[in-house]
Image (spheres, rainbow, N blue to C red):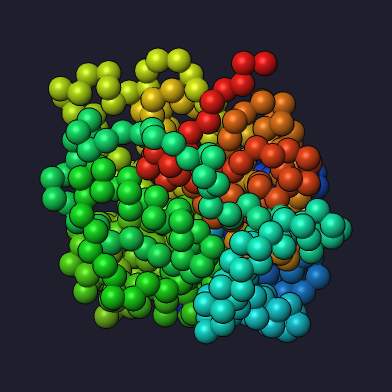
Amino acid sequence: MNLTSDARRLAGDLDFLLACVHCGLCLPECPTYQVLRDENDSPRGRLYLMRAMAEGRLGLSGAAELHLGRCLGCRACETVCPAGVDYTGLLEGARADLRQVNPPRARRTRLALWLLTGAPARSVYALSRLIRRLGISKLLGRLLPGSPGAAFRALSATAPLSRRDTGPSGVSAATVQGEAGATYALARGCVMRGLFGHVQDYSRTALAAWGYRELPLPSSGCCGALHSHAGWPDQARRLARQRIESFETSGARWLASDSAGCGAAMKDYGAWLRDDPVWAERAASFSEKVRDLTELYPAPAADAGASAASTGSCTARVAYDAPCHLLHGQGIEQEPLAALRSMDGLDVEVLQSAATCCGSAGIYSLQSPQLSRDILRPKIQEIRDGDYDAVITGNPGCIMHIGAELRAAGSDVPVLHPAEILSGSWKAERSST
């Protein structure tokens, strides 16, 4: 869990920074280091920079701003760190300090957050859906160069399944054994609600088939993940309090999340608010009740036999790419695979690069588009070489970023959310040629 708190900025973080034993195990796991080959763009190098900042040997501008700004926050380094360094908490605290040295960048970031999660968000997403529905995003994605073209291709990647892709498939309520009558509330969020409403409908379909009953949230806004990653902890905690209060009012047993980034953030609310005497206990209790959609997949019923498992000939071969904030942030590795592999006729292969960030990282792909695409390039090549029918990943930013770059590379392989598979809403036949 993170220990993020603006009461514990870098000046008071020296003990946490000294926890790094400088072993270097994080270097081969760091996407930016693998592309740039610069020690300053590795977790160990960034910790050195943060330590120099904390000790007053390095200012906030220049090297510190450059290299800390390049970090994706993918948390792969935390998975392999033998010393348990709270890298994410340190990074987010440092970014909160760095806002003061580059006011124009801070204003651009705040504007992006406001447009995506604030008062204009409903209109922004409504316009985006209209552009998508009319096919404008697909057209402009082909015609426009650079970042504008990538943005429209990413929007196209959010489109719902076409009718020809849909078909009967999946596990029914009769073949699985869940918690009888267990209740859940679905975290709708901002990007998921705005661009992936169809995915959330598929999530509800799957959860209903598994025996869960939905209770509505009185309100469901942004979870604060984007704000926390960007170095705006006060806003992140304000949104966390709103989400906690809304869930408590719902009376549901679980809070289901179908966005890996949101799920990781909400599971960290206990850490975000650990210094708040009013909210600390409520936040910790809330975080314990957050579940990724695939964590709620029930075990096969004892009498279901092979009917709940994938049987028969393979009708679709798909690649699974693990979202960083699911694998590294939440430590969830096997649950999505178990659920997906239960689907009849589905051959699921884990990408060799599944543990490596795709480069999306919230609004990172908007702020550092070229580096983001450079990080993604090997994964795109692996997908193209694999001749898959689809790619499956459980985070909206990953779906958009991978989908956009596949289109740029001339591939029409769809990038799907696990809910689209688990609800039985997608079915593909393998080509015989």
- Horizontal and vertical percent for residue 201? 39, 55
411 up-or-down from 309: above or below = below
Question: Of residues 163 and 365, which is closer to you in this image?
Answer: 163
The residue lying at 23 percent from left, 64 percent from top is 215
33 or 296: nearer the viewer: 296
Percent across and percent down for residue 228 are: 52, 69
Image check: 251 left or right of 412?
Answer: left
Q: Is residue 130 visible?
A: yes
Q: Of 141 and 432, which appears nearest the observer?
A: 432
In the rendered image, residue 105, in percent from the top left (x then y), is placed at 73, 77
Quadrant in which residue 227 is drawn:
bottom right
Provide residue 189's location: percent of width, then percent of height. Answer: 44, 67
Q: In which quarter of the image is the C terminus?
A: top right
**Rendered-image quadrant of the N terminus:** bottom left
Is 317 located above or below residue 191 in the figure? above
- Which residue is at 29% across, 70% downward? 217
Residue 116 seen in the figure: no
Vertical arrangement, residue 176 with respect to residue 148, above or below: above
Q: Which residue is drawn at 72% across and 43% down?
A: 406
Q: Which residue sits furthest left?
A: 180
